[in-house]
Image (cartoon, rainbow, N blue to C red):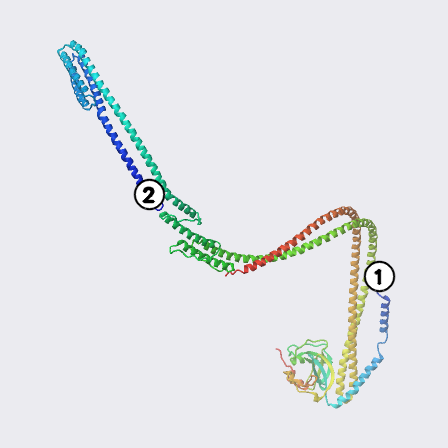
Amino acid sequence: MLSNMKIRSRLAAGFSVLVLFLILIGGLSLKNIAAEGDLLSEFYEHPFTVTNAIHRVDSNIVRMHRDMKDVVLYAHDRTDVENSLADIDSCERIVYQQLALAREKFLGDKAKIDQIKESMDQWKEVRGRTIALVRQGKVKEAVDFHKTYARRTVTKIEAQVNEVLKFSFGKAESFAQESRRNQRSTFAITAILVALAGILAALIAFVITASITRPLSDAVQAADRLSRGDVSVEIGSGSADELGQLLRAMGKVVQSMRGMGETANRIALGDLDVDVVPLSERDVFGTAMRNMVASLNSLAANADRIASGDLTIEVLPASPRDRLGNSFRTMTANLRNLTVEIAEVVNVLAGSAAEIMTTVSELASSSAQTATSISETNATVQEIRQTTDLTSQKSRQVYESAHRSTQIARTGRESVNSAIGGMQGIDERMGFIAERIVNLSEQSQAIGEIIATVADLAEQSNLLAVNAAIEAAKAGEHGKGFAVVAQEVKNLATQSKQATSQVRNIIGQIQKATTAAVLATEQGSKAVEAGVKQSSEAGESIRQLAASIEESSNATLQIVTSTQEQAIGMDQIAIAIQSINQASDQNVEGSRQIEAAARNLYELNQKLQQLVSGYKLA
Amino acid sequence: MSRKSSNIDWAALLKRQEAAFAAADAPSRDPEREKAQLEERARQLSRRPEGTAAATGIECLEFLLSGERYAIELPYIAATLPLTDFTPLFCAPSFVLGITNLRGRIISIIDLRRFFELPALGLSDLNRVIVVGDDRMEFGVLADSIVGTRTVATGDLLPVPDTFTGPREEFVAGVTAGRLALLDMGRILGDPRMVVHEEVG
């Protein structure tokens, strides 16, 4: 029933009940306060007015009594007396006034107030007599009189006043007790009522609050879970009030959020085929989602093109804050630059890899060669070791033979000296031969001169024959025989000339031969000189040889000792080469591995080149 | 060393030497060769009468001049002699080499090479002088060498070719097929240029 009421009416009903209670409590309290006020005013008007008035009366009476004493005591001072008298009069007026007031308000027997008034009248009489005595100058009598009567009267008045006061105080006491009773009852009633109102208010508040807060807390809980993104909340549409409406609206929100969530989930899983339909024109979320899907789709298309190697695309960001777009553009540009650089690097790498491969192959082969060389060296060292032993023996033999060589060198020197003597003899003979040959040459020169004469004669004979022929021709028929003779003479002259030229040729050859012979003897002489010189040098060499052979024999002794040391050193070298051999084997293995690695690198680089060539850059 | 020099066969050398001396002492005439020579000459002589009888030729003396063959008819020739000694003449034309003494007669020597304006060569020992003359004129012609007398058939003479220019064309009578130029000596001797008359003041 309550839950079907509107919250407004619910609140209105609760507050009305509370207000009614408040009015009830307020009315009761007002009534009690009014009764208390009445009591208080009665209390104030009666007993307290009376007591106050009586107190004033009492005090004035005391003052008047004191003044009267002054009058009696200072009777000689006229002014003083007069002043006191005036004071007595004023006090007397106040006394009467107060008495009248007390009488009016006195709740007890008013006759008692009248008795006080009578006593006051009596005292006035006494005072008048006393004052008269003073004025007459009969001070002594005045004092006696005062003493006798005045004191008695005043005491009587005092007693009366006290009686009145006593009554009044008793009255006040009874009033106060009544008032206290009254107050107590009022307090109890009001307290009960307030307690009742409090309980009621709490009840109402609890009921209303409960009816509001339960669905509200449900909504808050749902909103809280929603705010944390939990769209799995189930919201029941219980009541028909505003909260019910709110919950139903929230249910719709949850429904749409769940749909969006599913869509977002599909997008998050990469399914971009979702069709996002905005719920209304103002559906910011839906529109944004649709735009997001569209932009993601275009990015995905670009990414597909990039994936297929096309780096020529230019991605335009949707806004300056489009981080993904900007990143995508930067990524594409970087990818492009990167691919270009990679291509360059791959090219460089290709060259380097090829070079490395070549180098490694060379290294491998050289390592293998090294290994072979080392094993050869090892063998060689073994041989050298054996050779060293041989050397030791041989050098001993050499030392002995060096001794013999020194003696042989001595005999060699003697032989060389005798050879030099023989050669000098040959030189002299050579000079003799050369002289003879030159003589021969001179004689052939003489023959040449003779031949020149013969040639001249032949020439002249020839001319003579021509002249004879001319003469024969001039003689005509008779000269014919002479012409024949002339012809014969001419022929003879020609033959003579030919013979002379032959002789001249032969002489020329003889002269050439003699020149060659002279030159040959000269060369022979020079050769002999050189022979002498060489023999001397040979002698010197043999001497030096002998000296050096002696040195050699000494050195050979040293060699014998050092060869033994060498043998020890060769053993150490053999051990060292053994370890080098092992290291070289490891080296070969390592270079083989490096070669394999270099080949892998090369193949990798080939693949890389293929990959990079798959990218379209411009 | 001494062993090596003993390789020379001294005995053989001496034998060769003796053989050479023997050859020098022996008479150098070879009878068989002389006979063969004489027979050859006889054959040549026996052939000659046929050639001379067949053609009425011109008897002439052949000589060389600057490598070319020239011939002078024998009737004009007085003698031939070697150019032994000559005296150059000043103030004479360049073709006049000088004068020389021929058995007491003074004759001038003409250098035909200069006269024919051929490239001139220097003189040499082999130079010969052919003394030509007739009743008008006598002088010596310088020749490089003299070949000998020969007979040129009249029919063998051909007209002077175009290569012969200047004075040469004028004084050559004809040329044979063997490039033998026959000089027209009568014309040379009669030429006024040969007479040198010059006064030096």
In the image, is residue B134 above or below residue A358?
below
* SS category of the residue bearing label 1: helix
Considering every residue shown, the one lying at the far top of the view is A140
Quadrant containing the N terminus of chain B is bottom right
Q: Label 1 lies in what chain?
A: B
Q: Nearer the viewer, residue A101 or A202?
A: A202
* Cβ atoms at labels 2 and 1 below 8 Å apart: no
Q: Amino acid at mark 1?
A: Arg
- The residue carrying mark 1 is B3
Can you tell which mark lies on residue A11?
2
Is residue A89 visible in the rendered image? The answer is: yes
Percent across and percent down for residue A83 are 16, 17
Residue A423 vertical placement versus B138 (above, below) = above
Residue A465 left/right relative to A122: right
* Number of numbered discs overlaid on the protein picture: 2
Identify which residue, B143 or A236, lies in the foreground. A236
Does residue A479 show up?
Answer: no
Q: Chain of mark 2?
A: A
Task: Tell me the crowding category of disc 2: few under 14, some 14 to 19, or many 20 or more residues within 10 angstroms, Cα based.
Answer: some
Place residue A457 in its image quadrant. bottom right
Separation of disc 2 and disc 1 at Cα? 165 Å
Residue B201 disc label: none
Q: Quadrant of the C terminus of chain B?
A: bottom right
Name the foreground residue: A318 vs A149.
Answer: A149
Q: Amino acid at mark 2?
A: Leu
* Callout 2 secondary element: helix
A292 displayed left or right of A574? left
Q: Residue at x 79, y 52 (%)?
A: A545
Q: Is residue A300 above or below residue A79?
A: below
